[in-house]
Amino acid sequence: MTAFAQYADWFYLVGSVLFILTLRGLSGPKTAIMGNRYGMIGMTLAILTTFFLAPNPVLGLIIGAMIAGAVIGLHRARTVPMTQMPETVAMMHSLVGLSAVCIAVAAVLHEGVHHDALHRFELFVGCFVGAITFTASVFAYGKLAAKKWAKSVSGAWVKPLQATLFLSMIGFGSVYFVSEDLNAFYAMTALALAFGFIWIAPIGGGDMPVVVSLLNSFSGWAAAGIGFTLNNPMLIIAGSLVGSSGAILSYVMCNAMNRSLLNVLFGGFGAGAGAAVDAGDGTEKTHRSGSADDAAFLMSNADSVVIVPGYGLAQARAQNAVKELATVLKEKGVNVRYAIHPVAGRMPGHMNVLLAEADVPYEDVCEMDEINSDFASTDVVLVIGANDVVNPAAKDNPASPIYGMPILEAHRARTVMVIKRSMATGYAGLDNDLFYLDKTMMVFGDAKKVLEDMVKGVTGGGH
C-alpha cells in the first residue's frame, strides 16, 4: 500500500490528462467516441487508484455498490429511448449532488476529527451546492418527464420565498463555519434541499436545455468541493472541468436565446408552456396543409433541401426515417443538409446525438451560424417537430417574449414544409408565425409515419 501511494499522484495526473482529452474529444462529433474512451479509461484509473489508497476499505460494500451501479447504468444506457435522454441526464446530475451531500455529512459526523476553517468552508460549499443540485435535478427530471408532481409554480410569493430560503441557508452555513454547530449544518442542508426545488419550479419548459446544462455545471462544482474535503486531487480536477465546461455551455446557450443567465433562472419565461396563444389582433390565423406525397414531389424536384430537426423527431423516434429520406433525395441529385439550433430539443446537443444515432454524415450537419446565410437560396426547408427555434417572431415582433433570440431563418427559404401532429404551441407555449406564411405547407401526423410516406413518394413518383 505504501509503495503504491508513492505513485498515486502520478496516476491521478495521468487520469486528469485523460479527462482533459475527454473534453477535447467531445467538442466534435468525429472525435466524440475517442473522447468517451479517454473518459472511461481515466475514470477507471481514478477508481482503482482511490480504491488502493483508501485506509481499511469495506470491500463488500464498495464492490457491491460498484456492481449494482454498473448493472443499473448499463441497463439504462441500453434501454433508454432518445425522448427520455434529457431526463436521464438530469437524474444523473441529481446523483452527483446527493453523493456530495452524503460525503459532507459523513465527514462532519466523523468521530474525533476537528475540521479547521478551510475544511469547514469546503464542507459548507460542497454540501449546499450538492443539495441544491440534487433537488433541482430531481425537479428538472420530473418536468422533462411530464410528471404530475413537477408542475411549474408562479406568483408574487415565489421570489421572496427563494430569497428567504437562500439567505437562511447562507446564515445557518455561516453559523456552522464559525462554531461547528451540527444543528446549523443540518438546517443549512435542509434549506438547500428546499431551495433547489423552489428555484427550478418556476422555470418554464422553453428554458430547460439551459437548466440541464447549468445543473451539469453545478454537479461538477459540488464534486470539486467534496474533492477538497477528501483531499483527492483527481476529484478536484474532474469536478472543476465539468463545472467550468457546463458553465461555458450555459453561457453559449443563453447567447443563443439572446438572454442573460439570471433572466433564465429568475425570469420565469416559458412557465406557461402549452398555453393557448391567440392571433394577437383578434383575427383567426389560417394555414395551408398538404400530404406527404405533395411534400415528396416538391423535394424531389428541388435542388437543395435543408432539414430542421426538433423534439418531435425524437418523440417519434424518426431519426432513421429522416436519414432514409435524405439518402433517397441525394440519389436524385438533391443537396440535403441538416440545420441544428443550439437549444433545439430538451438538452444541449440533443439533435446532434439523435442524428449521430442514425449515422447521419457529420459533414451534412450544420450549426445555425454557418447555415443561416444559405436559407435564402434554399428551395425547400423541412421542419420536423421544431417550433420556437424557427419562429420569425424572434426577428420581427418586438412584443414576442423571444424577440431578439437568434433563430434558424427557415422563413427565408422558397418553400417551407412543417411536420407536426397538430397546430399546438411548442414547449415554450408560443405560437409560431412560420406556420401561417403563404409559402408554408403543414403536413400533419406522426413524424416517423409521415417521413416513411415521403420516402415512398420520392422513390415511387419523384423526378
Image: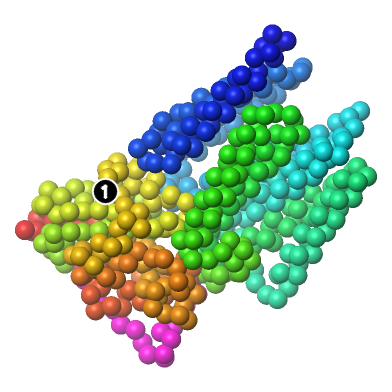
Q: Position of residue 416 (x, y in %)?
A: 25, 68
Amino acid type indicated by mark 1: Asp
Seen as rendered, the residue at the extreme left is 463
Check if residue 227 falls in the magenta segment.
no
Please tell me which residue is depicted at 39% across the width and 78% down the height of the picture.
396
From the top left corner, tell me how far across and down residue 181 is, in percent.
92, 44
| Disc 1, SS | helix
Q: Nearer the viewer, residue 340 or 383?
A: 340
Name the image quarter holding residue 305: bottom left
Q: Quarter of the image for the N terminus: give it.
A: top right
Q: How many marks?
A: 1
Residue 278 falls within the magenta-colored stretch: yes
For mark 1, what is the residue? 364
Using the image, determine if residue 355 lies above or below residue 303.
above
Which residue is found at the position 74% from the left and 52% from the top? 193
Residue 224: x and y in percent read 67, 38
Q: Is residue 374 left or right of residue 423?
A: left
* Residue 152 vertical position relative to residue 71 in the rendered view, above or below: below
- Kindly report the secondary structure that dominates the magenta region of the rendered protein: loop
**What residue span does the magenta drawing correspond to?**
274-291
Q: Residue, x 74% and y 30% (percent of image)?
A: 230
Residue 228 position in % (x across, y down): 73, 34
State whether residue 217 is above or below residue 168.
above
Estimate how packed mark 1 is, as few (under 14), some (14 to 19) or many (20 or more) residues with alpha carbons within 10 Å: few
Q: Is residue 462 visible?
A: yes
The residue most toward the top is: 3
| Residue shown at the point (27%, 58%) measured from the top left | 307
Quadrant position of the C terminus in the picture: bottom left
In the figure, is residue 135 to the left or right of 257?
right
